[in-house]
Amino acid sequence: MAMTPKLQALLAAATLLGAPAFAADAPAKKPAKPAAPAHSLAPLPLGEKVGWSHAPFEAGDCSICHAKNDPKNPGPLTKTGNELCFTCHEEFAEIMARKVKHPPAVQACTNCHNPHNSRERKLLVAEQTALCFGCHADIKGISEKARVKHAALTTGSKCANCHNPHGAHVEHLLVQLPFDLCVNCHSKDGVSDGRGSTLTNFTKWLEANKVWHAPVEAKDCSACHKTHGSENFRLLVAEYPAKFYAPYDPKNYALCFGCHNDKVVSEPETTTLTNFRDGSRNLHYLHVNKADRGRTCRACHEVHAAQQDHQIRDGVPYGTKGWVLKLNYTKTPGGGSCAKTCHETKSYNNQAGQPAKKK
């Protein structure tokens, strides 16, 4: 942005004034007096590239905020605290009246914005993520150290993809209810994760599959996923096998066993733990509890939503090319059958003492 001689004079004068003239601005009511910001609120030094300039400052209209229109001696601010900003930015009075407020924004707009100019968009005093992490050190640690990262933190509006930095109607300053926020973002075709796998378009998927997994039905994505970063595949809160086959080890199914009884795959015989049994022979145990090629939960169950009860899948992607292996599952009054899938057609009868006839 080219600087006019008038603007250069303003920059020089304001630089001489420095931060104290602005840091001393405090809200009228105690004990909300803000501490002096760690950053300078003076204009950028002469010669530095300006990325964003406040329109009154750019125009040389000091008296919009100060008592005088003299750039060498603008005098005190005409109002204290955020009330001065709201004089022009009237819409923020409503935003800051919302139920959930961001404390730095309540305290002083200048905690995050320079009233003159900045290298950053929206007059931010630092790059947006760095600014947020300056206070939210815990989230900084998670996002930077996590093995699996959430792209929402580094693309688009970054933190503001999900959070309103001023005020919101939803806890944690979320711009929408959590479930709506997740689904609306994950509602595009052809989006890939960092490993090249295509992500689900959940708007289409949930509309087409009406039997929802209980956490999805409760609209609680966070029951299974971490939003800022995770050590586990797909940002999961605990371990869950990512492939069709896996050796059985309870710790590999920590996600599932957080809600489901682990005995469903550790007891070879049962008449109570599951209906997926032939007489008392536990077919969950038979499929999963193997030292080598155990079928993982995803081999038969869709984890979000499906057409059939218990989220039984119509088919499962098999192999690296994504070919879909059809399960051909049919539910019967006393059990069910799978036809021409991993094996020849087999049926089961879950009535105790009445195993199905082998086909």
Image (cartoon, helix red, strand yellow):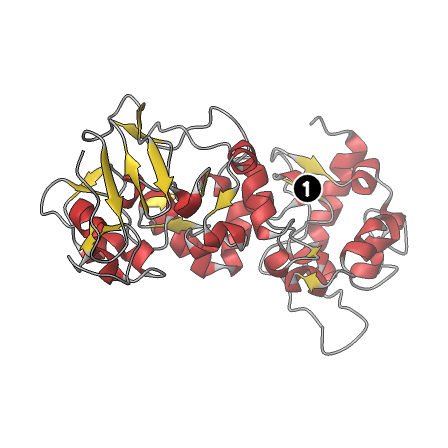
Q: What residue sits right under mark 1 in the picture?
A: 122
* Closer-to-camera residue (341/168): 341
Q: Quadrant of the C terminus?
A: top left
Measuring 75% from the left and 68% from the top, which residue is drawn there?
A: 26
Could you tell me the amino acid type at mark 1? Lys
Image: 344 above or below 170:
above
Measuring 72% from the left and 43% from the top, which residue is drawn there?
A: 12
Image: 243 above or below 286:
above
Q: Position of residue 59 (x, y in %)?
A: 84, 36
Q: How many marks?
A: 1
Q: Residue furthest left?
A: 291
* Closer-to-camera residue (15/180): 180
Question: Is 201 on the left-hand or right-hand side of 29?
Answer: left
Q: Quadrant of the N terminus?
A: top right
Q: Position of residue 258 (x, y in %)?
A: 34, 61
Question: Is 67 on the left-hand or right-hand side of 31?
Answer: right
Residue 346 visible in image = yes
Measuring 81% from the left and 72% from the top, which residue is drawn there?
A: 28
Q: Quadrant of residue 299?
A: top left
SS of the residue under disc 1: helix
* Closer-to-camera residue (3/51): 51
Residue 126 visible in image = no
Q: Quadrant of residue 79?
A: bottom right
Question: Is 172 on the left-hand or right-hand side of 232?
Answer: right
Measuring 74% from the left and 60% from the top, which residue is drawn there?
A: 21
